Amino acid sequence: MENYSPDEIVVRTIFLSYSRDDRDRVLPIIAALEKRGLIVWWDGLLAGGQRFAHTTESALESADVVVVVWTARSIQSHWVRDEATRGRDRGRMVSVTLDGAEPPLGFRQVQYIDLGNWGKRTASPAFRELLRAIEAVAADPGNSLSVERPVPAAREGGTKLSRRRALIAGGACIAVLGGGLAAWRLGVLSPKADGNSIAVLPFENLSDDPEQTYFSDGLSEELRAALSLNPRLSVAALTSSDAFRTGARTIAQIARALGVAFVLEGSVRRAGESLRVTARLVNGATGFQSWSETFDRKLANVLDVQNEIAANVVDSLIVSLGGSGDGASGKQRIGGTSSVAAFDSYLHGMALYNLAADEPSDRGALAAFDRALSLDPGYAAAQAARSRALTVIGSSYASGKELAGYFDKAIAAARKAIELAPGLAEGHSALGFVLSNGRLDLAGARQPYEKSFELGYGNAAILGSFALYAAFTGSFADARKAVARALRLDPLNASVLRTEAIAEFCARAYDAAQQAVRGALSLNPKVNNVHRILGDIALVQGDYGAARGYFEAETSPLSRIRGLAIADARLSGEAAGQRHLAEMEREYGDNCLYQQALVFAQWGRKDDALAALERGLAIGDAGLVLANTDPLLDPIRQEPRFQTVLHQIGIDHDRVV
């Protein structure tokens, strides 16, 4: 690590597991690791009352590396063993011994590092070995004791993955930051705070049942939705706020990183029919509370609590800005429900849908939305969510007449959501989503998408959805406007920067696209489909060797194979590219017709490219929504057959690129 230049440093997050009896011996290790630029979570960070006592579990699950300090004392600690087990099972454990004690049975097959004589010297061979081990495990998790669990196809790049990810703007912009807080730590992303801006951190689940986290998270997101309805407020989005789920950063640090003036945090304890919600609003600059309150209610009153918190927060902010808090500024959630049971089912569904994991989780989300609607048929937000789930399930797992049936139901659900709550941005966005991705009707999707942009100016996910639609239909000024607003609301979300990169690539603004890709990778080095953008830019610019390197680094299997088929054909002849094409056809079949068209167009086989697009149009390949502005299709762009395809998916003559 010592030979890295500042631009090469990737900041890693460390969870340090140790016995409190060894605290004095462990503190120098923590200090040395932090001096090397690593972010270290240890339970001492919970002292001082600066934050609510967030559970160690979330820190353990999100850390890049779990460093376990073994001593004669820690071997006897059930806590240390439990934390070590989780680190081992995640393939992210690094073992250290301070007194020569061997790790206990079950952990000895993983090599451990002896820091007994390191002398608090960062230049010592043992400490250097620790740094190398941390980097190796963070970069390539896994060890001989890692527990192998079946990984859903949606995570591993099978056919279902390609179809799930092919959907444009398919839901909330979600990114796992991992070690990507490097950009925040190094000061790259620090938007200036507006006086009326706020971040809502995930409320901590203090219930005895960890499965209730969906409820506390859902309450936080519903508060964001309610607060964002006020035009005087700027509310940071879910992903950026969620980056600070663990308690390792102060309110001031969080406020600076997100560019907000205030932070709302809280906790939820749910026991039977009893509910305790604690919330406090903190000034990010001073660290002083502007408002705090504890609500002891029956579960049946949770929706009232949500509205009370929103009203109090808005009034407190208005007072801080020199206005008067009149209680009328807190607005109820548009498209919400008065049924607590329906609300609970809706939160269950959103938690499953946002996983984007596999068919069972997507169908589980749909079932939860159906339950919510059976309890309250007028729940517009649940209708909008049901529409998105139906679109995803149809596009990802269905075919033929079954596919058409899913899209019919999705359109009906979205229209019902709009009928019930015309001001609900999610309903209009869901309708645009199914019309564009399901029906390939980009002309029909224009009005609902534009309405969602008008209504959802405080919702980063809806802004991202609209930005992609605008980019694919050639409305680049609108796309840039939406991306700029989304970045203000969600500055730590790699997916928003990926959306910017896609939009700029479609606009042929390659320098801007590359800059956005670098920003996305600084937040999440594992974000998919950004190396593909760099590779495609290199192809367009004729640098085929560089293109091949970018495609090799791409984490999306379909994008990687497609890119290599083009690059290798340029470098070594079509036969070399043909091997990749054959693999792509074997693995994905008709689910990669759009990608086949890109390959054929770049190979100069125009008729084959056009035939692939026409076949894709016939079966409803969602990839065709990219065709109007994709630079890789420029070799066939003037062909009459290509123009016919564009018109059939609803691209107006004046919007053809």
Image (spheres, rainbow, N blue to C red):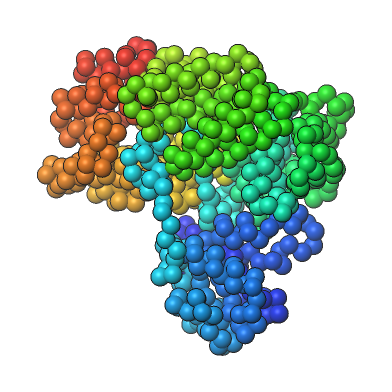
Position of residue 588 in the picture relative to residue 509 (left or right): left
Locate residue 332: give its quadrant: top right
Q: Residue at x 34, y 21 (%)?
A: 401
Position of residue 159 in the picture relative to residue 501 (left or right): left
Quadrant including the C terminus: top left
Q: Residue at x 35, y 45 (%)?
A: 157
Q: Residue furthest top?
A: 653
| Relative depth, front residue between 123 and 596 | 596
**x and y percentages locating residue 435 in the rendered image:** 44, 19
Locate residue 3: give its quadrant: bottom left
**x and y percentages locating residue 569 in the rendered image:** 17, 43
Q: Residue at x 62, y 25 (%)?
A: 374
Tell how many labels. Answer: 0
Q: Is residue 40 above or below residue 498?
A: below
Q: Is residue 16 above or below residue 7?
A: below
Position of residue 616 in the picture relative to residue 86 (left or right): left
Locate residue 396: give its quadrant: top left
Residue 291 shows in the view: yes
Residue 566 shows in the view: no
